[in-house]
Amino acid sequence: MVSPGILLVDKPAGLTSHDVVARTRRAFGTRKVGHAGTLDPMATGLLVLGIEGATRLLTYIVGADKTYQATIRLGQTTSTDDAEGEVWATAASADWDSVTDESVRSGIAALTGAISQVPSSVSAIKVDGRRAYDRVRAGEEVVLAAREVVVSRFDLLSMRQGDGVLDLDVIVDCSSGTYIRSLARDLGAALGVGGHLTSLRRTRVGPFDVTDGVELEALEGAATLTPAAAAQRLLQTLEMSREEARDLRHGKRLAGQAGRLDGAIAAGIDPDGVLIGIMEKRGADLKSAMNMPGEQQ
C-alpha cells in the first residue's frame, strides 16, 4: 500500500502541473495524487503534491502565501501577458522618455500592498465551468472580474537594458490568487510602455521551500512528508489523548475544549504522532473539520 504524504517537487519549464501529477502517479503507483496551486508550463519551481489520503491536506495548503522570483520585460505587450504569447505592441522611442529608475520604483510601490487585480484572460480561472484559457483558445473574448489580493513584498533586484526593452528582476511575496503576469502587465501599462513576464519561479508555498523539492528524475522512491509533519508546519498543533483521538475520529465533539485553539483551525495529533485531522471550534466545543482516512493509522 502507498503511504499518504506530501511531496515537494521542483517543476521544470515546459511541463504542465498535470504532467507532473501524471509522472508522480506512475512513480508512486497510485492514481490518488493532487496538487496545491497550478504552475503555468513556462514557470518553474515549487509544486506541492498530495499522495493518497494526504490529498485532503491540499485544501489547507492551496491558500497559503507564496514567493516568486520573476523577470518582467518592459517595452512589449503580449496576448498572454507572458513570453508565450504573441507580441501585440512594442513601445516607441518617445514612450521611454518618462521611464526612469524613480518611475519604475514608484510603479512597483503602487502595486504593493492590498490591491485590486484583474487576472490574465488566459488564466486557469473557471468561467461557467470552463477554464478561461480554453475559452480564449476557442476564440471567445474573456474579461475576468477584478479580485482583491495582497502583495506584501515587491522588490526590484536588478534592471537590464536591452534592445528596446528593459528587463526587471524582481521577487514577490503575495497572497494566494495573485497573478505575477498581471503585475507585469499592470506595471508596464502604468509606465506607458507595456510589459509582460519572461520568467517565473515559485520558491515558496506557505512553510514549504523549493530547496526541499525533488527533481522529476528523482521521483522514484522520493521521500515525502507524513501528513502529521506537513500539518505541523502549516498549523498550530494540538496533542490529543487516545480517548480524545478516538472520539474525534468517530465524529464526536470535545466539550468545552474550544479554548485550546489559538486561531480558527489546528492539527490534531494522536499519541503515536499520527494526524487525526484538522480541528475547528464549534461554539465552546472542539470538533474535527476534516478526518484523515484510516490507512495512515
Image (cartoon, grey):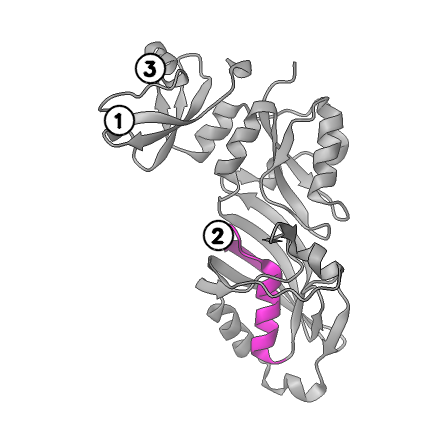
In the depicted structure, whether residue 106 falls above or below residue 27: below
In terms of depth relative to the viewer, which is nearer, 254 or 131?
131
Residue that mark 3 sits on: 244
In terms of depth relative to the viewer, which is nearer, 126 or 208?
126
Q: CA distance from mark 1 to mark 2?
A: 31 Å
In the depicted structure, whether residue 237 falls above or below residue 68: above
Q: Position of residue 98 (x, y in %)?
A: 58, 85
Q: Quadrant of residue 163?
A: bottom right
Residue that mark 2 sits on: 175
Q: Position of residue 4 (x, y in %)?
A: 59, 22
Q: Is residue 136 left or right of residue 296?
A: right
Residue pictured at 47% horizontal, 29% vertical: 231
Amino acid type of the residue tagged 1 in the rendering: Asp
Amino acid type of the residue tagged 2 in the rendering: Ser
Q: Quadrant of residue 93?
A: bottom right
Query: What is the span of residues highlighted in magenta in the rendered image?
Result: 170-192
Q: Is residue 49 left or right of residue 272?
A: right
Q: Is residue 112 visible?
A: no
Q: CA distance from mark 3 to mark 2?
A: 35 Å
Residue that mark 1 sits on: 285
The tag earlier along the polypeptide, 1 or 2, is 2
